[in-house]
């Protein structure tokens, strides 16, 4: 990618010799605390770069301790941590960001913009190298564009406690390192509405765990409700000039899309969960309006009081938790050429057929035509149905109807992706 070249000189010698361990000894390399890396992504459609804001030490590490190298190759960014002394890769995690979505909009052709982001890793015991990579759109490979040394004893790592918010355990099933820790954040709930927040959180979580495959994996989750208090109820509605003073400053009309609900500044989210184990973040907004948003390993966000809120939140959680892509192709978005048809999308439930063997080819019956014609008499049929990823031609989905397209149930291909992610966070071998 064009913006990568000037950074390669910084990291090329570093990548010449290191060994990737099949299994990392957590206690040898890490403390059971969190290293938080706050940074800015800034740029436009043709170039971007990252800049450090601050490093923090946080008191809790709730992620896996026996699977430390990301097995999925999802997302648009990848953070890697190397032990400085022996050059071993000791941790990696992929994610996507709101900035990465913005650069696919028409506005990114006209201006340069910045978004705040935060990534966490286990806290290293010894000096380490942190590398941030971005996926090259042309070849779909990750390439490094930021590198820095981490001295865990540096006086510039912020150890200060953040605000203590009330935390309610909605469900606790065991050691966070062996469970999926789902954190539900209150957004747009005043101090007098915290009981409503708990009721809403329980209702939407109950709905999520009534769906397959979550229904069979409820015991694999811990659920934490964090009580953020807002001055005003609701959220921002820029399109109708209605604004609220809320804890996380959420709002609709993201990228001029009325129903796209997001939070542009990620740092207050991370501040809110500084002392709670967190593998996935669900933000519950006190509003009746239809809409939401979900970004892989970033957050899922949705409203509480719309009649479709439960299904919307399950859809957005599919993006956030399992890296599922949108399967619809007949609704307008602000994205332009979001996917390259020359490469295979990283999302497990859509394909350009460039490397279909890496997707659900093993799940379709022999002799299934490609593309697969829609058969309304067999809505559960798994095949290769054209249309998905916001375009009608060249991208394919595994089932005609799925929650990632509309308000249907979760299809078997998406269910498998979800179960694989649950197994990862619970420290189980991938199937």
Image (cartoon, grey):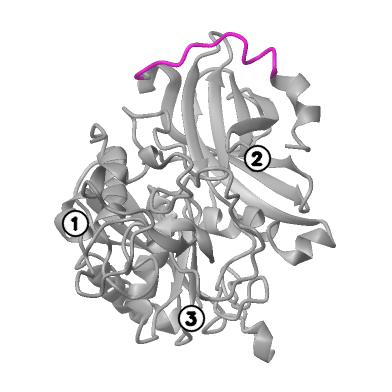
Return the residue at label 3: 190
- Residue at figure coordinates x 61%, y 57% from the top left: 338
381 within the magenta span: no
- At mark 3, the secondary structure is loop
- Residue at figure coordinates x 39%, y 86% from the top left: 306
Disc on res. 138: 2
- Residue at figure coordinates x 40%, y 69% from the top left: 405
Give the number of the mark in front: 2 or 3.
2
In the displayed structure image, the side of residue 205 where residue 108 appears, left or right:
right
Percent across and percent down for residue 311 are 33, 74
13 within the magenta span: yes
Please name whichever residue, 89 or 119, is drawn nearer the observer in this view of the structure.
89
Local crowd at mark 3 within 10 Å, few (<14), some, or many (≥20)? many
- At mark 2, the secondary structure is loop
Local crowd at mark 1 within 10 Å, few (<14), some, or many (≥20)? some
- At mark 1, the secondary structure is helix
Give the number of the mark in front: 1 or 2.
2
State how far apart marks 1 and 3 are (Cα): 30 Å
Answer with mark 1 or mark 3, whichever residue precedes in sequence.
Answer: 3
Quadrant showing the C terminus:
top left
Return the residue at label 1: 218
Local crowd at mark 2 within 10 Å, few (<14), some, or many (≥20)? few
Against 199, is 280 above or below? above
Residue 145, located in which quarter of the rendered image? Answer: top right
Residue 166 visible to the viewer? no
Name the magenta segment's main secondary structure. loop
In the rendered image, the residue lying farthest to the right is 110
State how far apart marks 2 and 3 are (Cα): 46 Å
State yes or no: discs 2 and 3 in contact (Cβ < 8 Å): no
Please name whichever residue, 393 or 127, is drawn nearer the observer in this view of the structure.
393
Percent across and percent down for residue 29 are 44, 19
């Amino acid at each position: 990618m064009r913006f990568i070249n000037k950074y390669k000189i910084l990291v090329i010698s570093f990548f010449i010799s290191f060994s990737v361990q099949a299994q990392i000894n957590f206690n040898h390399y890490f403390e059971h605390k969190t290293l938080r890396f706050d940074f800015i992504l800034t740029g436009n459609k043709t170039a971007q770069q990252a800049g450090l804001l601050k490093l923090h030490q946080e008191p809790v590490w709730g992620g896996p301790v026996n699977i430390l190298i990301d097995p999925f190759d999802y997302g648009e960014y990848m953070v890697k941590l190397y032990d400085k002394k022996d050059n071993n890769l000791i941790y990696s995690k992929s994610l996507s960001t709101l900035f990465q979505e913005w650069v696919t909009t028409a506005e990114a052709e006209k201006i340069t913009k910045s978004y705040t982001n935060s990534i966490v890793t286990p806290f290293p015991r010894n000096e380490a190298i942190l590398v941030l990579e971005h996926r090259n759109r042309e070849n779909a490979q990750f390439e490094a564009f930021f590198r820095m040394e981490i001295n865990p004893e540096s006086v510039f790592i912020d150890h200060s406690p953040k605000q203590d918010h009330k935390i309610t355990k909605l469900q606790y099933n065991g050691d966070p390192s062996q469970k999926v820790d789902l954190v539900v954040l209150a957004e747009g709930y005043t101090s007098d509405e915290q009981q409503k927040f708990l009721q809403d959180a329980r209702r939407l979580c109950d709905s999520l765990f009534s769906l397959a495959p979550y229904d069979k994996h409820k015991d694999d989750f811990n659920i934490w409700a964090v009580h953020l208090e807002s001055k005003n109820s609701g959220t921002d509605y820029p399109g109708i000039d209605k604004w609220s003073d809320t804890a996380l400053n959420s709002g609709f009309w993201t990228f001029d899309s009325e129903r796209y609900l997001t939070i542009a500044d990620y740092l207050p989210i991370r501040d809110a969960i500084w002392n709670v184990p967190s593998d996935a973040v669900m933000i519950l907004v006190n509003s009746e309006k239809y809409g939401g948003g979900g970004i892989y390993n970033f957050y899922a966000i949705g409203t509480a009081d719309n009649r479709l809120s439960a299904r919307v939140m399950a859809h957005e959680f599919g993006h956030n938790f399992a890296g599922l892509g949108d399967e619809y192709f007949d609704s307008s978005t602000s994205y332009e050429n979001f996917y390259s048809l020359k490469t295979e999308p990283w999302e497990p439930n859509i394909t350009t057929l460039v490397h279909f063997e890496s997707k659900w080819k093993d799940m379709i019956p022999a002799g299934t035509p490609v593309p697969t014609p829609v058969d309304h008499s067999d809505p559960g049929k798994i095949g290769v149905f054209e249309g998905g990823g916001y375009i009608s031609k060249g991208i394919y989905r595994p089932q005609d109807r799925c929650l990632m397209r509309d308000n249907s149930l979760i299809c078997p291909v998406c269910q498998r992706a979800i179960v694989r992610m649950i197994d990862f966070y619970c420290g189980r071998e991938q199937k």
